[in-house]
Amino acid sequence: MSNDKFITPRKLNGFWELMPKEQILFSQMLDTIEGVFKTNCFLPLDTPVLEYSEVLLAKSGGDTDKEVYRLIKGDTDMCLRYDLTVPLSRFVAMHQNELNFPFKRYQIGKVYRGERPQKGRFREFYQCDADIIGNESLPMVADAECVYLYEKCFEALNLKTNVHISNRKILAGYIEELDKTNVSNDIFIVLDKLNKISLETAISMLNELGLTEPESENLIKLTKMCGNFEEIKQNLCNFSKNDLFLQGLSELEEVANAIKLMGVKNAIFDLSIIRGHNYYTGTVFEAFLKNEETSIAIGGGGRYDNLCGYFSEKKMPGVGMSIGITRLFDLLLKSDYFSQKQTNEVECAIITFDETFDFGLTLLAQLRNNDIKAECLYASKSFKNKMKEANRRQIKYVLIIGEDEVNSKIYTLKDMETSEQFKLTLQEVAEKIKSDRMCN
């Protein structure tokens, strides 16, 4: 084929792709988080990437509808999932008679949003979700368990984080008191953008929705409240007598008490947390990665009492947490978080000569059967070049197989980091590599 017929290899903007070395690190992070989910008694689930549009868009709202990838094949109208929560609600509604409640599930998978790619934001990315679904009712301790789960996940990853917690009923109740319920979703959208727009712009946008300037200022003042729960409670006690407002405050207090009992240390109560999806009905939270300069959002979630109502007459309230693991990994990759020692899956390279190659394959199988990640360097290269290859690939150990080793069954194991050499039986080789693995 002539060169002018070749297609230039390229990938879509905003879609993620890692080199194998980075993929190993990413997979290790996923395994760590999955281990925390399992330890805390969440069950695995994997829903389809594609859903019927009427299902996925049942209650999205806000800016989400604009970001959905929609496909039509024949008479079938479909969307790529933009999160893992709506597919979960569809699943629970379909299988409600087969599940034990409260149903605790986790899912790790890709989601898709057609937003503008920028630093830390992608069009295709992984989410790590854990949700709890109740039957008719769900105690507020479930919300606290999601906050607790964040802390445990980030402890396992050795990361410093804070979880900021609020309750949408507090703001919704105050909006109801202002008699502006008819534009509450639009108000939430404005308030959710306060960290991205100026105060003057926010007040102007709220005024356009029918709020007076004092009402807008009070609403923004309410949104700015942040601290420990006792501080928040003291500030809110005389702010409003609206029933929905007071219910939100009461629920927030239940969560505060429960996370204290569970030993959560890094929780902050912050009424600026709103969440963009309008299916959230109560508790909402976001997780932030802390560093010396700023805090970066790396996950969020909350309570959704009505979502399953679009698929079933039975009331099945839920609460869930999500970690934006792609964004988190991208941030950590650009820091010094990862050790290069973690990036090599090969523990031992077997280096043979022409006359010992067949024997080397036999040893390869025996080492792998003994749970050693071994590789036989079988390219037609000289011994020197094979050693260089092992060094370039950062393989810690090489097992050298010459005629003497074949005859004596005593093999030369070289530590490529220290240049030490050992004469060992194959069983001793396996034991040394395993011992080294445990130390690291």
Image (cartoon, rainbow, N blue to C red):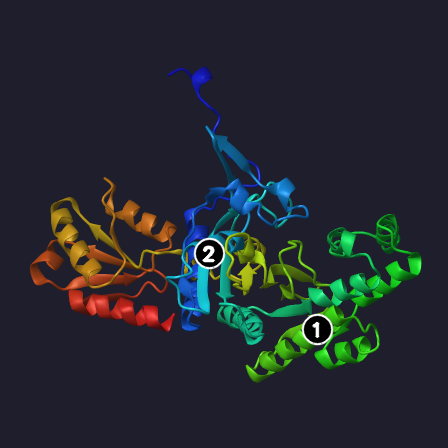
Q: Which residue is mark 2?
A: 93
Q: Which mark is residue 247?
A: 1
Question: Is residue 190 visible in the rendered structure shown here?
Answer: no
Q: Position of residue 354 (x, y in %)?
A: 15, 44
Q: Secondary structure at mark 1?
A: helix
385 with respect to 31 (left or right): left
Residue closer to the observer: 349 or 281 = 281
Q: Quadrant of residue 273?
A: bottom right
Q: Residue at x 67, y 74 (%)?
A: 252
> Farthest bottom residue?
261
Q: Position of residue 91 (x, y in %)?
A: 44, 54
Q: Residue at x 84, y 61 (%)?
A: 178
What's under tag 2, amino acid-wise?
Ala
Could you tell which of marks 2 and 1 lies nearer the N-terminus?
A: 2
Q: Secondary structure at mark 2?
A: helix
Q: Position of residue 328 (x, y in %)?
A: 56, 57
Rate crowding at label 1 as few (under 14), some (14 to 19) or many (20 or more) other CA atoms within 10 Å.
some
> Farthest left residue?
407
Contact? badges 2 and 1 (CB < 8 Å): no
What's under tag 1, amino acid-wise?
Gln
> Farthest right residue?
213
Rate crowding at label 2 as few (under 14), some (14 to 19) or many (20 or more) other CA atoms within 10 Å.
some
Residue closer to the observer: 418 or 177 = 177
> Farthest front residue?
313
Q: Which mark is residue 153?
A: none
Q: Residue at x 43, y 47 (%)?
A: 48
The image shows residue 16, relative to residue 295, as above or below, that is: above
